[in-house]
Amino acid sequence: MNKYALVSVFDKTEVEIISKFLSEEGYKIISTGGTAKYLKEKGIEIISLGSVTGFPEVFDGRVKTLNPKIFGGLLYRRGIDDEVKEKHEIPSIDIVIVNFYPFESVLEKTLSFEEMIENIDIGGPSMVRASAKNFKDVVIITDPADYKNFMDIYNENDGKIPFETRKIFAAKAFLNTAYYDSLIFNYLNEKEITESDFFVLGGRKETDLRYGENPHQKAALYSFPPDSYIKGLYQIQGKKLSYNNIKDVFETMSLVADFKNDTFCAITKHNNSCGAAVGNSVKDSFLRALEGDPISAFGGIIGFTKTVDKETAEEIVKSFFEVVIAPDFNEEALIVFKKKKNLRILKQKKFPEREFNISVLDGGFLVQQEDKPLWIKDEKYEQVSGESISEKEEKDLEFSFKIVKHLKSNAICIVKDGKLITMGTGFTSRIDALKFAVSRVEDKSVLENSTLASSAFFPFPDSVEFAHKYGIKNIIQPGGSIRDKEVINKAVELKINMFLTGIRHFKH
């Protein structure tokens, strides 16, 4: 009885090697289109698809493999359906090597909707699924990286592929079709997050990481196509990024993105900013950010909105940092950074624009829209106590509320003149967060006439009273407490300018 292998690939990496191997092992190679032409040019004898099906390709190649003689050869159960197979002269296809039209790569191109639709592979995934379903009798290979492994196992087992190996190949085949379909779904889907009854997410592994948050945890980095932020990161120098580095980089640049039109620098440690400032230059923004908490900044992540120059680099290398990331670096700056060979220098293609985030649970996961709007009340904020403020103070209101949005709750930050002075994050009470923030400031005089932002409302007036003791002049907070009136009355009594935004920014 003739043995058949079906080979139909877009990615032709080493396909001639495995096809030659199978041909030498007595398999007749069924192929079509570009694959058939390629194999012929490599001197490999093939059987045309049409000669097997007795039917030509139609509709500009839209239909060629979708034929009962092909799918019958993939799906018939050996020892059960043999009589029917023989009756209809269906070939026994025992090995299938298929990969798909590159829908993922064309997502990154500017193609019309009609062109995108024509790049959706139908025959390939259909053959893969059929072969994978019948993996007990059919070996399905979808990844050129598996060719050598297959040939080695074939030789070691006298041409027999063990059940477990077949199962592994089949699982990988279904993984490939699931990922492929997720790309198409996300391209066509117009619904908002959580509107659909199902949630589909497909990611491609970029690299394995040394470990996760701790050495005993495995970790890897995946990216979402087409133009993910991760794929737009370029490491210029330094050690390989760790799991914690990557998380800190993303959190840093998510904050930096909110200031992308300013000359701004953020210094992050453990997903919280310990320094942030606008400046007259890139160097100035860094030095002002560093003043916020130079002790915590040690070993941190530095993010910039503008190109890093030599003068800024010379300041950075005076201390120890894990990562510096910016839209670009000039050549003189890169020469300076070479003094710190382990310092990771990252260039980013774009600022992060995450649409949603996910928290994995036991047996499920939570999905939510990204926290994007800064405030909603009166399209900006409502002043509920105090006097009119200066333009500089108004800028600090926005600056502080952007910073606190990116800090872990319960979060308080205090700013002045476009610079983060101090912050308190992750406390179980708001007053404790504020007390901690103030305790970190050695020279309490810098708190005079500063601006305080809170990620959520004040449940009691105690925070207002405490802020007043240190001369804090402006408070911006969401409002929404059942004691808002009491809190506002305290601000009126103490002559503190209070502003309500109508939107909170919890970040757990």
Image (cartoon, helix red, strand yellow):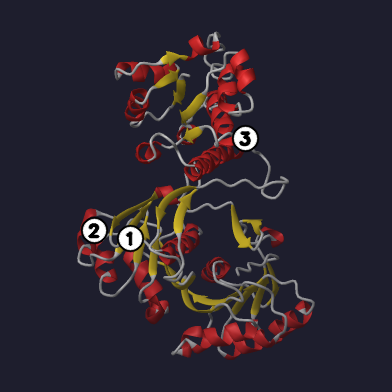
Residue 350 percent coordinates (x, y): 43, 49
Q: Which residue is mark 2?
A: 334
Q: Disc 2 versus disc 1: distance between alpha carbons?
A: 17 Å
How far, Cα to Cα, is label 2 from label 3? 42 Å
Residue 303's spot in the image, x, y percent?
A: 40, 63
* Quarter placement of the C terminus: bottom right
- Residue 407 picture quarter: bottom right
- Residue 377 location in percent, x, y? 70, 62
> What is the distance, in whole Å, between disc 3 and disc 1 at their CAs?
36 Å
With 490 as the anchor, is 319 left or right in this view? left
At label 2, counting other C-alpha atoms closer than 10 Å, the crowd grade (few under 14, some 14-19, many 20 or more) is some
Q: Can you give x and y, in whole percent of width and height, for residue 71 in the image? A: 58, 23
Tell me: residue 446, above or below residue 149: below
- Looking at the rendered image, the disc whose residue lies closer to the viewer, 3 or 1, is 1
- The amino acid beneath tag 3 is Leu
Residue under numbered circle 1: 240
Q: Which mark is residue 188?
A: 3
Mark 1 is on which residue type?
Lys
